[in-house]
Image (cartoon, rainbow, N blue to C red):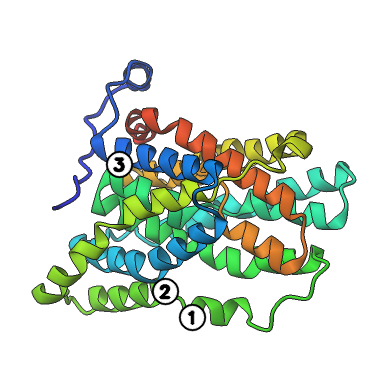
Amino acid sequence: MREPQWHPPPKVSATDALTRFCYSPPMPPSLQAFLLLFVTGALLRLSGLLTKQHAERLGTFVFSISLPATILISLDRVAFAPTAWKVPLAAGLVSLPLVLVSWPIARMLRLPRPTQGGFLLAVGCINSVYFAYPVALATFGDEGLAQAILFDLGQTTLTLTLLYALALWHGSATPSARSSLPRLLSAPPFWALAIMLAMKAAGLHLPSWLQTILTPIHLTTIPLASLVLGLSIGFESVRRTWLLTLLGVMLRMGGGLLLGWVAAWLLDLTGLERAVVIMIAGMPSAVTAVIFATETGLDEDLVASIVALSICLGVALLPWLPQLAALLAVR
């Protein structure tokens, strides 16, 4: 089954686009399924039937098997525009200013050093694998996912360099011997992306027999990622950090959305590229931030609270996502 492809919306005024956004039709079935599976996962976690350990095991399968298949299949179907280099650059124009703005705020609040680091980490990390990828695929089809992957190229580079370094600098624990660079180079999605980009550069495509094998695996990515996202939700520490958590969520999603708009304007992005960049810039905080916080001795409770609350807010906005996408494509 082929995902619905993105078709540029007809040129309309911003007023007409806003009217369509406010009076929106029902969500597409793909987003309805995403929302249903997320709620199912959250209920299973809250009921105690499944735990964080189950989420980690399922997440490992998605990261190591489903996601590489999705990257190979989706990128094989699309052709990149000459302006594709602008999309990963946009990630830097979003995350770098956001961290630079958040840093003096954290210092002004006189937070303990591990809490400062956790705050910066949660605000700077964007949830790509388990939120932006499935949402972009469900909303825009393969072409949208391809743009999301390009954006994540820039974001992942920042996450494994600048944000990881900030976590080490603020943290109280000695990190594991395995550095961020070997972790990146050994990741299956990295190899899938590297192989696919090399094939695109050479003008090659996946053989039909390999597409036949990978397509059923690729189709599991959205449902499994949605379930993992729900299973990752935990609110145990939100009550103790709720004020700082709200500030972090506002900066991550509200500040990110604003900086995404600025980045799209500076790079003169249009159509699908513009819509994907602005949308992903306002995505929730990444589960990766919790992993880094645990590894480096940051304030794990604060980071987990920002991640959980931002994910819930992002899911709550899903019913308006198709209309928001059309609005974002209007210059």
Q: Quadrant of residue 189?
A: bottom left
**In the image, what residue type sits under mark 1?**
Leu
**In the image, what residue type sits under mark 3?**
Thr
Give the x, y percent position of residue 285: 57, 48
Work out whether 294 lies above or below 330. Answer: below
Residue 244 seen in this snapshot: yes
Secondary structure of residue under mark 3: helix
Numbered tag placed on residue 132 in the rendering: none
Numbered tag placed on residue 185 in the rendering: 1
Report the residue marked by disc 2: 190
Please report whichever mark, 1 or 2, sits nearer to the chain's N-terminal start.
1
Crowd band around label 2 with a 10 angstrom C-alpha radius: few (<14), some (14–19), many (20+): some
Q: Quadrant of residue 247?
A: top right
CB atoms of marks 1 and 2 within 8 Å: yes
Q: Residue at x 50, y 44 (%)?
A: 283
Q: Quadrant of residue 200?
A: bottom left
Nearer to me, 207 or 67? 67
Give the x, y percent position of residue 8: 23, 38
